[in-house]
Image: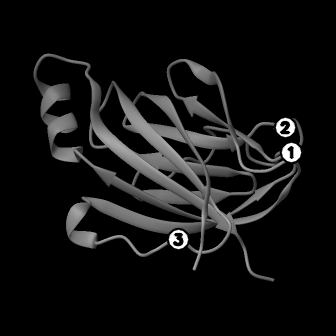
Amino acid sequence: MAELVRRQHVDAYVGYHAFGLQESDDADLPVPFPDDFDFDVFLSAHPGRLDITSGGHTHTAAVSVEVWDGRPPEQDLADWDEQAEADFESTSGEVAAWSMHTGRNDDLITLADSGGSWRVRVSCVGRAAAAALSEGEGTGLGVERYLVQFWPAQP
């Protein structure tokens, strides 16, 4: 059974219904955030990058990131508005959140001491509330919540 290695919390500054998680050592990425962002998909992947669409236009989403030593237990889909999985490559073992509005977040997410291949599951709840808030009074904090789970990819 897989064990939880680390848990971190970061705020993701959502702009234009989007944010991303990108390899911290991003100088050599072929498609840096936000180039080629696909707004029609909840989760899409580029080399060293994960693009995530949000229910709201402009707000701060609460993101809990978990790193596991193996595939984490399955989540009950009824608990989430959206859920998807993708592959992710990291050269440094660290990831940064990115916003369409503010660019790179200063907080780093630590996956490991060095690079590697990962599988990731992204789950989200609060999309309708974030959308309603965007249409009404504007921005919000933590209305939309994400759980991002990383585990080593199997060879």
Q: Position of residue 132 (x, y in %)?
A: 12, 34
The answer to whether marks 2 and 3 mark residues whose Cβ atoms lie closer than 8 Å is no
Question: Identity of the amino acid at label 1?
Answer: Ser
What label sits on residue 72 in the rendered view? 3
Query: What residue is drawn where x is 46% and y is 43%?
Result: 64
User: What residue did someone put label 2 on?
Assistant: 25
Name the foreground residue: 149 vs 41: 149
Q: Earlier in the sequence, mark 1 or mark 3?
A: 3
- Whether residue 60 sits left or right of residue 122 in the image: it is left
Q: Which of the two residues, 150 or 4, is positioned nearer the viewer here? A: 4
Q: Residues within 10 Å of mark 2 (few under 14, many from 20)?
A: some
**Above or below for 96 versus 80:** above
**Discs 2/3, front:** 3
Q: Position of residue 67 (x, y in %)?
A: 62, 55
Number of callouts: 3
**Disc with the residue nearer the chain's start (2 vs 1):** 2
For the residues bearing labels 2 and 1, Cβ distance under 8 angstroms: yes
Residue located beneath label 1 in the image:
92
